[in-house]
Image (cartoon, rainbow, N blue to C red):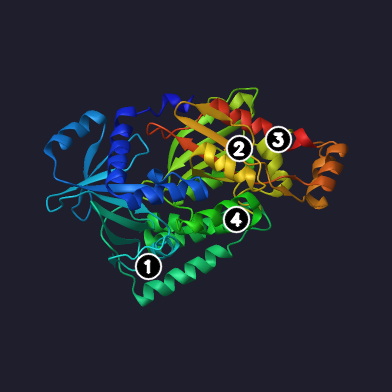
Amino acid sequence: MSTTDVWSRVPEAASLFEDLFRTFAIANPLLAELEERFWITAGVRIQNLVDHWILPEDPTLKAKLPTLGLVEIEMPEGDRVWKHPGARLPALRFKSKRTTPCLALLVESIEDFAQANALALDACHGEIDSGYQCAHLTLQAGELMPITRQGYNGFAPGTLSPEEAGKLALIREKLAHRPRTGDEAEVLEQTTKLAHEIVMEFGTGRATDEFFLAERNYYLPRNRAAQWQYAQQQKIGIGWANHDHHTYRSSRASFRALIQLFKTLGFITRERFYAGAEAGWGAQVLEHPISRVVLFADVDIAPEELDIDFASVTLPERDTLGTIGLWCALHTSSIAEAGMHHLECEFDFERSKSLLEANGHPVMPPFTNLPMLKQAFTVAETWAVPASRIQPLVEKRLLTSTEGDQFLTRGAAGSHLEILQRWEGFKGFNKTGVSNIIRDTDARRNA
């Protein structure tokens, strides 16, 4: 299966939003200045951070939206919003009292965004960490509305009581220090119990955002390219608001439990990949219906497992290690000590590549280069591998003694940062490209 068969390109709908943005930027020089600053400083396309637009009532435009694939949805609070269910595009809202457009820009902290860009905001509604906060800045011909979302997809500014703030602080402490060492099955069991506790307290949307905030915080100190990129994005005050997907590598034995953990958090399985008998890997894509988090979960797959739903069965141990199994054997799985294999964010591909490489973080050749999608990894962070992990692999003949000695001496490829650019609202991935990069990042290729 190829994801280009699952998700379509929607050029007409994407052009509508690009035209909205371009017209707005021309009419509002401040936004044009921010667009240039984001691009120059961090290689970020500000368009990728547009959460939604609020427009004056326009019956002609409303009548056109269904022909572009957008559907009107009524939110629990009564707000009506237009969204494209099969594309990665902003949402649209219409308000009869508006006379000019309002652009809602997603950031991780309104305070950081305003300070980094020297903006004197007119007002701010909602409390920090309340789930939804929005600020307002009147422009020459419209309004800029920086917003934050934390596991909430509506439009009502939130409140946070002292009791709720205390519970949130406790949950963040637990997530920051959750179990990662020891038996992998036990790590997953304890982590799933913690996830269930957070879901019961805060719901799946907020639980997911808090869980992956902690996961990004764990990943960041272990990858220098990501550290540099994050520092650039903090210079423009957006944090990781441009994240596209988080990737986890798992052993075969723990893959089913890992998927169950993600389902406990409320994730829905999307397309599955299997690249063919020669590739030896499989991946399950998962998406959350409330949070913006998308997951890519990788595992070794045997040729005879082509037709099974490998995310829902217990995979037996094999006498060989593929790229993913070896990575987990050398470093532990992503849910354990290793952390995420990579974090992927949306950029202007060529600009971000140039910035990373000019600052000492080389980028591998693109593994996807399609009209609607371009992707590449930074060169892997090399991690030390303890002898206690290498020796059992050599004894089981999963590694040669030469390979084991080289991993012990040189270390092995650890995590990456991935840079990605999407066009035409395409929200899928490229099976062939992913297969190539899994092959090219096999630790044995450089052992």
Helix, strand or loop at label 1? It is loop
Q: Which residue is mark 4?
A: 220
Q: Nearer the viewer, mark 4 or mark 2?
A: 4
Q: Nearer the viewer, residue 151 or 83?
A: 83
Q: Which residue is mark 2?
A: 299
Mark 4 is on which residue type? Answer: Leu
Residue 287 image offset from top left, x and y in percent: 43, 43
Q: Earlier in the sequence, mark 3 or mark 1?
A: 1
Mark 1 is on which residue type? Answer: Ile
Q: Which residue is mark 1?
A: 128
Residue 61: name its quadrant.
top left
Kindly identify the residue that appears in the image at 27 percent across and 41 percent down: 23
Kindly identify the residue that appears in the image at 62 percent across and 49 percent down: 225
Mark 3 is on which residue type? Answer: Asp
| Residue 431 in view here | yes
Mark 1 and mark 4: Cα distance apart in space: 23 Å
